[in-house]
Each structure stands twice: as C-alpha cells, then as structure tokens.
Amino acid sequence: AQSVSQHNHHVILSEAASLELGCNYSYGGTVNLFWYVQYPGQHLQLLLKYFSGDPLVKGIKGFEAEFIKSKFSFNLRKPSVQWSDTAEYFCAVNERAGSARQLTFGSGTQLTVLP
Amino acid sequence: DSGVTQTPKHLITATGQRVTLRCSPRSGDLSVYWYQQSLDQGLQFLIQYYNGEERAKGNILERFSAQQFPDLHSELNLSSLELGDSALYFCASSVGSSTEAFFGQGTRLTVV
C-alpha cells in the first residue's frame, strides 16, 4: 500500500524566510502528487499538483514543488513566506493506474509564520 | 468555494446514536471520497465511490457505511457512536479516480 511521509510536524518561520517542506512517498508505480493547504477552520484547498512533464510545478500563492523520482520526493517550496501562509500543509499521492486510486495523505505540517 | 457541499456543518449527538452525513459533489464529478480528520489520527481515508460503485475502502469501521446514489450525492452513515468518533468528516469529489480532489467544508461531529 502506498504511504506518504511528512517529516516536519511543525515549522515556525519569520516573515520573508524561505520555506521547504519535505514529502516522501512509497509506491513503486506511477503516481500523481499533490499539495493541499488547510487554513485554520477551513477545508483543504489544492495548492498544486503534478501528473507528468516538467518536474518543477508552480501552484497558487507563489508556491512550487519539485518531483524527484529517484528520491520518491515532492518537496514544497516558497522563497518568501507571509503571515497569511500560516496553515497546515498536506502532501498527497494517488496511483495513476489500478482500480482503487484513493488519495493518500501525509500527516501534515503545521506552518506558523511570525509577523 | 470548492463546489462540494456538505451538510450539516455541525452535529452534536449522544453516544450510541446514529447519524447521516450528506455530500453533494461538484457538478460533473463522478468520484466521491470520505475522510475523517482528528487531532490524533490526522486525515484518514474512509471510502471512495465512483459513479455509484464502491471503489476503495480505507480505515472505515464496521459501524460506518456509505453509499453513492444515482444522482451522485453520497451519504456517510455512522452508527453506535462513541466518543472517539468525534472528528471532522470531509467529503471530496473528483472527475475521475486519478484527478485532483476538491474538498467540502466538512461536518464537525461531536459525540457527547
């Protein structure tokens, strides 16, 4: 079964600092990769996705992520965070083939940005 | 607004009771997913339906069941409720099984 690991449980940064959140997955087949964000008290929203092609994908709000197939990683980055980026960030994976393609989420990383 | 509608937004009920959570997917989406989010367990996949058929099962308890109706809306039934079932229950929908999922606002269930 596929699994997703997010090693940073809580990250605290000052405004304007750079961000990188780690995500590793375990699955031998072809996968689709996603990052979702959950602002306090809200539902999950899609930040960006990778299906195929350029392994560097750009999402909303200045976020980007890089897919490194050899490392089974899909790390999220942002050059300069803002206070409004305070939220929980979830990496997710689903299989591209097969009949059961549920989205499997990591445990999430809580990002706190200090003003 | 993601286009996925969940009702009710909040639900408070007693242990041993049964509740039904409802989800209307985005127009055109055939897949519906149910997730449970709690502080200690994180975001847990419960079950997926695709065009009325069960497609995948995750960590769903036997006391829980779900179905997707011909109009594609879905219901999650939780019975014999326990205090530990208190959580946020999210529904998500997608066009197919391997495209991105869009989440509803969730139903916050409190079992007292």
Image (cartoon, coloured by chain):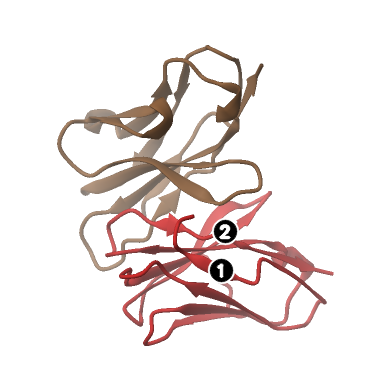
Chain colours: A brown, B red
Q: Which class describes the residues within 10 Å of circle 2: few (<14), some (14-19), or many (20+)?
A: many
Give the mark nearest the N terminus, 1 or 2. Answer: 1
Residue visible at 46% across and 82% down in the picture = B67
Task: Give the residue number, with chain letter if any, for mark 1.
Answer: B6
Q: Answer left or right for A30 relative to A74.
A: left
**Rendered image quadrant of residue A82:** top right
Task: Give the residue number, with chain letter if any, for mark 2.
Answer: B105
| Callout 1–callout 2 Cβ contact below 8 Å | yes
Q: Which class describes the residues within 10 Å of circle 1: few (<14), some (14-19), or many (20+)?
A: many
Q: Secondary structure at mark 1?
A: strand
* Residue A28 visible (yes or no): no
Give residue B73's position: percent from left, percent from top.
44, 79
| Label 1 and label 2 in one chain | yes
Looking at the image, which residue sits at the far left?
A53
Residue visible at 51% across and 49% down in the picture = A44
* Residue A18 visible (yes or no): yes
Residue visible at 66% across and 66% down in the picture = B9
